[in-house]
Image (tube, helix red, strand yellow):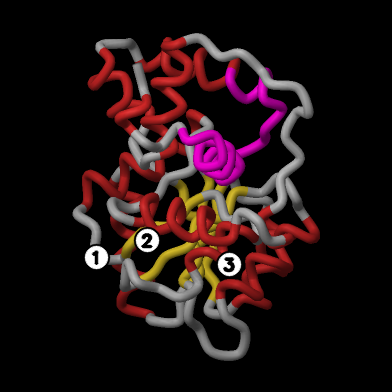
Amino acid sequence: MRVLLVDDHPLFLEGLKNLLLANDIEVVGVANDGITAALKAKELQPDVVLMDVQMPVADGLEGLRRIKLEMPQSKVVMLTVSSDDAYLFEAIKAGAAGYLLKGMAKEPFLDALQSLASGEAPLAPGLAAKVLQEFARREQSRATEVSFPRKAVPLTAKQIEVLTLVAEGMTYKEVGESMNLSLATVKYHMREIMNQLELENRAQLIVYATQSGLTKKEEIK
């Protein structure tokens, strides 16, 4: 995995760089603001951009939007110090591939980062619930309109259970442990669900699950 790091605090930047290098993750470059991040992302073509939200000159949201405009398929994971970050929803809506807390323990942080390779959108504990609540609040507004299939798409009971757990914030690994399934089986179910529902990412899954009432555990049979 080739990573571009973006943060305006030199000590944090150096510490994160050393952490990644110590775990065989290549750091291809660093930047200190959103504009420079977009320029370096275009030049270096990293697999993942790890970017702070609040920075001078141009913040992480500005950098995210610039990167997604130039490279729509790029994976940008936002970093924040607080789970109450006001930018959370806007970053997810703008195409962030994940949102992680700077204060996370080393192992969960690295696991979340590696989950990108499995097609997951890593969210720090507690943040998935906040995204779910915000999407539910805005689901009738144009800000969260998603073009779901016009006809109802029948999902199997197991697919519904997998979708529900993912929408409620579990990682694929946690879903597998909860349902006694292998990681490969969970990934298979998620690919099938995405294809059947014609959805593209976890944010859309959350909207679909909310609108369909699948996040209410008591309704799952």
Q: What residue is shown at x 50% (from left), y 83% (from top)?
A: 55
Q: Which residue is mark 1?
A: 103
Q: What residue is shown at x 53% (from left), y 46% (from top)?
A: 2
Q: Quadrant for the C terminus, please.
A: top left
Mark 2 vs mark 3, CA separation in Å: 26 Å
Nearest to viewer (mark 2 / mark 3): 3
**Left or right: residue 220 compared with residue 202:** left
Mark 2 vs mark 1, CA separation in Å: 15 Å
Q: Amino acid at mark 3?
A: Glu
Q: What residue is shown at x 73% (from left), y 60% (from top)?
A: 142
Figure check: 58 above or below 163:
below
Q: Amino acid at mark 2?
A: Lys
Can residue 204 be seen by looking at this rendering? yes
Mark 3 vs mark 1, CA separation in Å: 21 Å
Instruction: Tell me the crowding category of disc 2: few under 14, some 14 to 19, or many 20 or more residues within 10 angstroms, Cα based.
Output: many
Query: Which mark is first along the chain, 1 or 2?
Result: 2
Q: Which residue is mark 3?
A: 90
Residue range (magenta): 193-213
> Could you tell me which secondary element the residue under label 3 belongs to?
helix
Give 47 or 55, whichever is nearer the viewer: 55
Q: Which residue is mark 2?
A: 17
Q: Position of residue 69 (x, y in %)?
A: 79, 60
Question: Residue 44 lies in what quarter of the image?
Answer: bottom right
Figure check: 140 above or below 32:
above
Residue 185 within the magenta-colored segment of the rendering: no
Figure check: 9 above or below 206:
below
> Could you tell me which secondary element the residue under label 2 belongs to?
helix
Residue 194 within the magenta-colored segment of the rendering: yes
**Left or right: residue 52 compared with residue 10:** right
Give 44 or 154, whichever is nearer the viewer: 154
Seen from this angle, which residue lies furthest front?
219
Instruction: Tell me the crowding category of disc 1: few under 14, some 14 to 19, or many 20 or more residues within 10 angstroms, Cα based.
Output: few
